[in-house]
Image (cartoon, rainbow, N blue to C red):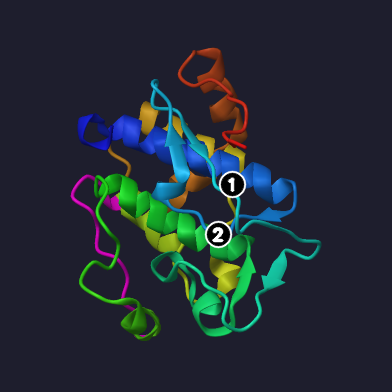
């Protein structure tokens, strides 16, 4: 699917995932294994998040695993690598890596490094490079997910994520990060004009 997709389709795929993750956050669940391999793509290219084997229900938006717990290193935030501490914010980090997978058309993240060296590289400030299919604006969204301090990972707010999609529909040359904070009325206008529809949460059980 990815090799046949256009830029707007790639973005819409990411929006589908972000909506689903915002829904999970609202239901107080942490996925802990968000990656392209755990998403299902329908015939109309709608993407649904699946595989909840590692998901946890939390009351305080944080879950610390016991020592020796296995987790997907290349999709994990530094606080997971060092303290096995999961939260919605670590899911947001994984979402940034998933975006990279989508815009790289399915490449393996950090393909030049093995798992042992990933944590060291991340703490040195290394991040995934900009995929060829991603604009600078899209890449800024990815990098915003990869702050070392968990509190700085942006929350997966569904209205903001849909606004990102709408803004791309309305403008072909976004150059700033401010499009994440579009006025909610712009989103309503876009719905009225039929630019985007409000879908059900893309969660597959």
Where disc 2 sits, the SS reads: helix
User: Which is more toward the observer, 130 or 88?
Assistant: 88
Read off the residue under disc 1.
Answer: 21
The secondary structure making up most of the magenta span is loop
x and y, in percent, of residue 200 in the image: 62, 27
Q: Quadrant of residue 130?
A: bottom left
Provide the residue span drawn in magenta: 124-136
Marks 2/1: CA–CA distance? 8 Å
Quadrant showing the C terminus: top right
Quadrant showing the N terminus: top left
Q: What residue is rendered at 26% in x and 31% in y?
A: 5
Q: Residues within 10 Å of mark 2 (few under 14, many from 20)?
A: many
Relative side of 80 to 134, left or right: right
Is residue 134 one of those drawn in magenta?
yes
Q: Upstream in the sequence, badge 2 or badge 1?
A: 1
Relative side of 26 to 37, left or right: right
* For the residues bearing labels 2 and 1, Cβ distance under 8 angstroms: yes
Where disc 1 sits, the SS reads: helix
Q: Quadrant of residue 159?
A: top right
User: Which is more toward the observer, 21 or 183?
Assistant: 21
- Residue 81 in sight in this render: yes
Q: Residues within 10 Å of mark 1 (few under 14, many from 20)?
A: many
Does residue 135 sit above or below 31 in this rendering? above
Q: What residue is rendered at 71% in x and 68% in y?
A: 62
- Residue 141 in sight in this render: no
Q: What residue is rendered at 59% in x and 46% in y?
A: 21
x and y, in percent, of residue 89 in the image: 59, 63
Read off the residue under disc 2.
Answer: 91
Does residue 41 sit above or below 117 in this rendering? above
Is residue 2 one of those drawn in magenta?
no
């Amino acid at each position: 699917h990815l090799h046949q997709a256009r830029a707007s389709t790639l973005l819409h795929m990411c929006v589908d995932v972000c909506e689903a993750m915002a829904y999970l956050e609202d239901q107080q669940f942490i996925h802990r294994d968000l990656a392209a391999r755990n998403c299902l793509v329908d015939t109309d290219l709608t993407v649904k998040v699946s595989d909840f084997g590692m998901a946890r229900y939390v009351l305080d938006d944080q879950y610390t695993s016991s020592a020796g717990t296995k987790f997907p290193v290349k999709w994990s935030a530094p606080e997971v690598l060092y303290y096995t501490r999961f939260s919605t914010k670590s899911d947001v980090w994984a979402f940034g890596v998933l975006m990279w997978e989508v815009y790289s058309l399915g490449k393996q993240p950090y393909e030049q490094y093995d798992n042992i060296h990933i944590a060291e590289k991340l703490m040195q400030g290394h991040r995934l490079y900009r995929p060829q299919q991603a604009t600078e604006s899209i890449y800024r969204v990815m990098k915003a997910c990869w702050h070392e301090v968990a509190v700085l990972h942006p929350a997966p707010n569904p209205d903001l994520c849909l606004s990102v999609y709408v803004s791309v529909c309305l403008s072909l040359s976004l150059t700033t990060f401010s499009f994440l904070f579009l006025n909610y009325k712009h989103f309503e206008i876009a719905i009225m004009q039929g630019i985007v529809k409000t879908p059900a949460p893309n969660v597959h059980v």
